[in-house]
Amino acid sequence: MHKKSLIENRSFACLAAVFCTLLWGTAFPFIKLGYSQYEITGENIGGKLLFAGFRFFLAGIMVYVYSCIRQKRLIHLQRNSLKGVLNVGVIQTAGQYMFSYIGIGFTSSANTSIITSFASFISVLAAPLVFRDDKLTAAKAFGCAAGLAGVLVINAGGGVHIEGLFGDFCIFISTVFAASGNLISKKYAQKINPVELTAFQLMLGGGLLIVFGVLFGGDFNIASLGGALILLWLALVSAVAFSIWTVLLKYHPASRIVIFNLLVPIFGTVLSGVLLGEAVFRAEILISLVLISVGIFAVNSNIRFRKK
């Protein structure tokens, strides 16, 4: 009889997913601090893509070194794993973040947060089409609606704008890539070691972002000590969070894990207030957290709405 590991335990998986979103939430203020250190302005798309590329490439190297040390041998990319690494690296890392960093320069932070939240919604709806054991229920639909309402509440005073569609369109494409990346990552994690998959796809995706950054004319002084420390932290965040996230997707239904992504803007907003001194501690934060928590509980519960 198969004895379940700790990562397969649902309660532990929920805590691990929250930990991942907390780590990703730290990226919000640290990316801003990194832009300040490297003097990357809002219009410098190439510089932003280079910054993202170095971050994810370094993250891939970190995961690779960890995997080699853990297995006490050099890890090689197997031929039968190449397709999975290419698909996940191009879609989940390169595609998602390229359109995200381009779109951010042409739309408001409120628009970005709201549109990005649809990734969880899309993943929950699409999961039953890809995985037979991940069925769409009324409770999951309710959970998505509650979570989306929470994201709308936290951005109630953020100044949502509709005058420019290009930025919103780029963010939406990034969201589609993010949702697709979660599903294909789960698919290939069944056949490839999740940690090795994470290592190679981050290096591939990060390398592509560096190429795109150069093509967009990006340039910044990588020798900045403060900037280098921030970049290393962001790389560590990606290395740890993506590795754990991929393992969680391997052992649990995608819909139960991806819904936790709705916590990222909550953590990002609160941590921005703590680290950057931004005025973010509002009643909307608490209301948003309650709604998102209700949504996460509904998606991860075994509630069934019975027809009379």
Image: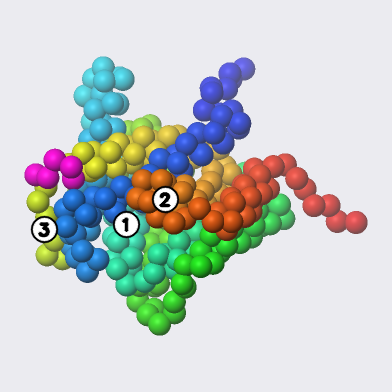
**Front residue of 2 and 296:** 296
Residue at (34%, 61%) from the top-left corner?
Answer: 100
Which residues lie in the magenta part?
223-227
What's the amino acid at mark 3? Asp
Q: Name the outermost residue toward the bottom.
A: 163
Question: 10 Å neighbourhood of mark 1: few (<14), some, or many (≥20)?
Answer: many
Q: Which residue is mark 1?
A: 97
Per the model, the C-alpha gap separating discs 2 and 1 is 24 Å
Q: Which mark is residue 273?
A: 2
Quadrant in the picture for the N terminus = top right
Q: Earlier in the sequence, mark 1 or mark 3?
A: 1
> In screen coordinates, is 140 left or right of 37?
right
What's the amino acid at mark 1? Tyr
Q: Secondary structure at mark 2?
A: helix
Image coordinates of residue 256 in percent, x first then y, are 58, 44
Q: Are marks 2 and 1 in contact (CB under 8 Å)?
A: no
Q: Which residue is mark 3?
A: 219
Residue 74 vertical placement versus 289 (above, below)? above
